[in-house]
Image (spheres, rainbow, N blue to C red):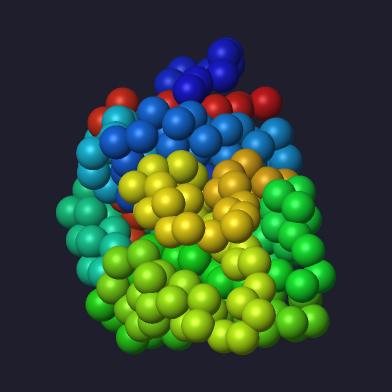
Amino acid sequence: MTLPHPATPGAPIPGGSPTLLLAAHGTRSGAGERTLAALAEAAAAARPGCRVELGYLEISSPLLSAVLPAVRGPVVVVPLLLAGGFHAHVDLPAVVAEHRPDAVVARWLGPHRLLTSALARRLAGAGLRATDAVLLGAAGSADPAALADVRAAAHRLAVRLARPVTAAFAASGTPSLPEAMERLASTPAAPRVAIASYVLAPGHFHDRLATAGAGLVSDPLGADPDVAALIWHRYDEALTALPATPAPHQAPRRPSTPATPHSSPGGRSLRTR
């Protein structure tokens, strides 16, 4: 959604920071789109001096391929992805290279201590018990490095909760969600299973977690303030890769690192003050 602002759409904030472009995958879930829009608004509210845009790789609108060329001035793309994988390493960089090669792409979100805090908060709000067995439920990936990211997030959560946490995957990856549930059910005096939903928004993968038969499933991470803070942390990390502002009539220099923003039709500015 777009917040009202006096500036020309697509124009940088005079004397302001580079535009933050949030790059999401896309979803057929209306609730998922609303959640991601709320996350973008939370990020905009956390740093009102920056313009914030939201675009999608596919399915949802606006598409990144349309947003990227519409935004003027420096752009930092922050992938709304919890782990690496095809979208982070191939899909997103290709869209950025085609539509906005001068943009800088930040690292994907996870794993990070701020996500751990958000996960623990969601579990507590859902009624986690001291005796529950905890699974970190994620979408999964065919990329071993992406699976390693999720397992690292499970380890961080285990340390935070002071109990074992197993990463389980709704799509690609082992153990699968059904396998992890079956293992826990086969233990003597099987405990109640709590699934920490390691997805950003409602949609297909959260539905898979919700119907796995666990005694408790936390809400998606959504517009949690720690997720918004992590977005700006990734943005600030990426700022070091932005080129200096060129002198008048001087061609802009290429960024020192490959760019990978997403493009999306009809970019929507969330805040410009």
| Extreme-front residue of the structure | 189
Where is residue 146 shown, x and y percent of the image? 39, 78
Q: Quadrant of residue 88?
A: bottom left
Q: Would residue 96 appear left or right of 115 to someone viewing this image?
A: left
Q: Quadrant of residue 265?
A: top left
Classify 9 as above or below 71.
Answer: above
Q: Would residue 228 appear left or right of 80 to someone viewing this image?
A: right
**Residue at the (30%, 67%) spot, across then down:** 171
Query: Quarter of the image containing the C terminus?
Result: top right
Where is residue 29 shown, x and y percent of the image? 36, 34
**Residue at the (60%, 27%) spot, across then down:** 272
Q: Would residue 155 appear left or right of 137 to someone viewing this image?
A: right
Classify 273 as above or below 58.
Answer: above
- Compare residues 212 and 207 and report the one nearer the observer: 212
Classify 134 as above or below 221.
Answer: below
**Residue at the (56%, 72%) spot, across then down:** 135
